[in-house]
Image (spheres, rainbow, N blue to C red):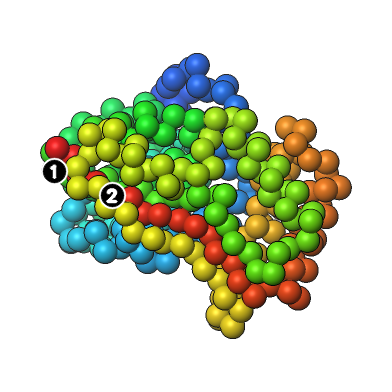
Amino acid sequence: MAGNEQSQAREQATEQSQAREQSPAKEHSPAKRRAHMPEGTAKIINSRTLETGFPRLAELVAPGMRVLDVGCGSGAITRGIARRVQPSGYAVGVDVNERLIEEARRAHAGVPGLRFHLQDVYAMSFDKAFDLVTASRVLQWLAEPARALERMARAAVPGGRIAVLDYNHEKIEWRPEPPRSVRRFYDAFLKWREDAGMDNRIADRLPDIFERAGLKQVQVTEQHEVARLGDPDFHEKARIWADVAASRGHQLVADGYIAEAERAEAERALCAWVDEDATYQRLYLLAVEGATP
Ligand SMILES: C[S@@+](CC[C@H](N)C(=O)[O-])C[C@H]1O[C@@H](n2cnc3c(N)ncnc32)[C@H](O)[C@@H]1O
């Protein structure tokens, strides 16, 4: 093994053992287990870019900034951040999922000013190191989003910005109403999340969580993801829940929330609904930002 490969392997082994040691009590919690992204879900996150996946963040990122992207997944959005902060800034992506961090390193090798680390948000020890700290679609998967936000705020310099993007899953809109099997799957998905302590309405709770974390100048921007029949990418966007049924759906089956036949029927019905009936889908998302004192 060449010298730099050896040191990279050592760095990764240290990260892996740190990730295992961090918050051992939480390691086996239902939220931690259910938040784990199974194979197949990367397809959804890989299709995002900074501009399409988090437009408000694209407005905030400027050349020279040091940016931390928490829960970066396979790094599609982080890559866009690194591009925008050039030539003197840099972007660091962290995620608790080893497979996704390895994928991010592989997919974006050679992008200047871009690094990825295996890291649990609850155990982050960054201190006043970043101008902007962001997390998109991550706090929704945590049983303690306020504790995660505190870690994020600590990672930012005084006067630095925190920008979070997340869903209110209860405000999804589908037109026309999809078949009953789809609703059954969606309701089971929400219950499965809620039972693990995740907040299905987190987008609308974020401003309050920001205020309580002591963040200033809290500002909210609507970032709903809308798919309208006639849009060039309508089918791709409207299919997101069919992809969720095909990937995360198996977690619901394994945890006893639905039977495999119900999951398979919801997936089939969602594909048919997108191809034959659907005219509109709105996923409700808010971007919430604030500044550290
Ligand atoms: C829905 S994906 C979002 C990925 C990306 N930010 C995006 O918007 O496309 C949620 C990500 O949060 C990560 N995640 C979940 N819990 C985490 C934790 N405790 N610490 C760090 N990352 C976490 C998951 O591994 C996953 O990559």
Contact? badges 1 and 2 (CB < 8 Å): no
Does 252 sit above or below residue 27? Answer: below
Give residue 232's mark: none
What's the residue type where badge 1 is placed?
Gly
Q: Amino acid at mark 2?
A: Glu
Residue 110 in which image quadrant: bottom left
How far from the left and from the top, in percent, is residue 77? 39, 57
Assess disc 1: are there few (<14), some (14-19) or many (≥20) residues with their C-alpha within 10 Å of its C-alpha. some
Question: Is the residue 120 above or below the residue 47 in the image?
Answer: above
Give the SS element for disc 2: strand
Dividing the picture into quarters, in which one does residue 221 lie? Answer: bottom left
Say which residue appears at 74% left-offset and 55% top-offset. Answer: 182
- The residue under label 1 is 159
Quarter that holds the C terminus? top left
Determine if the C-beta at disc 1 is less than 8 A from ligand 1: no
Question: Dot 2 corresponds to which residue?
Answer: 289
